[in-house]
C-alpha cells in the first residue's frame, strides 16, 4: 500500500501533458466548455503545424491535438500565452487568442478523431514494464497510473491523452523535462523528477510505446 501511495503522489501528466506553472485563472477550470463550431473557424491556421484535424501529420516533432482533452488544450494555450511554457512559435500564435478562442479551439480539437501511431516492436520489452508498473526501486511510478492503460489520460485531473502521440514529440518532451528545460514549477516539477531517472534508451522506448497505444 505504501508503494501505491508513493506512486500516486509522484504521478503527473506526461510528455505534452504537464504544465510548467499554474495556468491563468481563465484556463484553470477543467470543466469550462468551448464552442467547437466557433473553434473550427479558427482552427485552419493551426493545421499548418498540427496537420488537418490536428492529427500531427506535418512534422512528427510537433504534437497531435486531435482527441486531446479540451481542458488540457485550453490550459496549455494559456501557458503559452503567459510564457510560462516556452515556445516562440506558440507564444506568437497564442498571444492573439482570447480566452473564448482558446476554449473554442480546445473544444474543436477534442472532438476530432485521433489517428493512432505505430510503436516499434523493439520498444515493448523496455517500455511496457515501466508504463504498466513503473520501477519502485528507482522511484518511478507507472505511467498508466495517471494516463491510463491505453494512454487516454484523465480529463477531470487534466492528465492528458498520450496514447497515439507522435513518438518524436513525446521523446523531445521527456528530454526537456530531464534537462530541466521544462518542469521548473507546478505540475511539471513532478515530471522533471521522473524524467531525470530515465535513461535515453528508456525515453526512446516509452515514446515509441505510447505512440502505439489506442
Image (cartoon, rainbow, N blue to C red):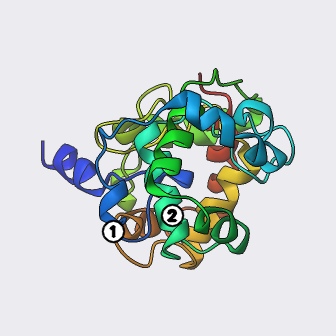
Residue bearing the label numbered 1: 22
Q: In terms of secondary structure, where does tag 1 sit?
A: loop
When the figure is inspected, residue 53 is found, relative to residue 74, above or below; the finding is: above
Q: Horizontal placement of 179 versus 33: left or right? A: right
Q: Horizontal placement of 187 versus 48: left or right? A: left
Query: Tag 1: Cα neighbours inside 10 Å, few (<14), some, or many (≥20)?
Result: some
Residue 86 percent across, percent down from the top left: 59, 75
Q: In terms of secondary structure, where does tag 2 sit?
A: helix
When the figure is inspected, residue 75 is found, relative to residue 111, above or below; the finding is: below
Residue bearing the label numbered 2: 195
Residue 178 percent across, percent down from the top left: 56, 71
Residue 164 percent across, percent down from the top left: 65, 32
Whether residue 195 is visible, yes or no, is yes
How many marks do you count on the picture?
2
Q: Which tag is nearer the camera, tag 1 or tag 2?
A: 1
Figure quadrant of residue 128:
top right
Q: Horizontal placement of 209 versus 2: left or right? A: right
At horizontal 56% and vertical 53% (from top left) the residue drawn is 16
Figure quadrant of residue 173:
bottom right
Amino acid at each position: 500500500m505504501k508503494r501505491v501511495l508513493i506512486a500516486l503522489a509522484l504521478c503527473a501528466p506526461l510528455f505534452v501533458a504537464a504544465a510548467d506553472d499554474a495556468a491563468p485563472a481563465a484556463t484553470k477550470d477543467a470543466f469550462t466548455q468551448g464552442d467547437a463550431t466557433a473553434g473550427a473557424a479558427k482552427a485552419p491556421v493551426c493545421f499548418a503545424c498540427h496537420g488537418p484535424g490536428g492529427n500531427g501529420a506535418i512534422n512528427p516533432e510537433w504534437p497531435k491535438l486531435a482527441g486531446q482533452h479540451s481542458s488540457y488544450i485550453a490550459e496549455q494555450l494559456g501557458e503559452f500565452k503567459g510564457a510560462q511554457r516556452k515556445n516562440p512559435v506558440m507564444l506568437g500564435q497564442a498571444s492573439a487568442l482570447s480566452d473564448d478562442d482558446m476554449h473554442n479551439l480546445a473544444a474543436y480539437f477534442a472532438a476530432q478523431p485521433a489517428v493512432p501511431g505505430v510503436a516499434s516492436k523493439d520498444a515493448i520489452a523496455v517500455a511496457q514494464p515501466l508504463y504498466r508498473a513503473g520501477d519502485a526501486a528507482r522511484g518511478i511510478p507507472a505511467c498508466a497510473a495517471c494516463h491510463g492503460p491505453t494512454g487516454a489520460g484523465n480529463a477531470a485531473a487534466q492528465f492528458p491523452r498520450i496514447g497515439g502521440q507522435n513518438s518524436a514529440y513525446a521523446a523531445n518532451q521527456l528530454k526537456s523535462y530531464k534537462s530541466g528545460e521544462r518542469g521548473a514549477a507546478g505540475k511539471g516539477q513532478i515530471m522533471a523528477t521522473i524524467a531525470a531517472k530515465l535513461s535515453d534508451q528508456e525515453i526512446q522506448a516509452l515514446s515509441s510505446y505510447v505512440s502505439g497505444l489506442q
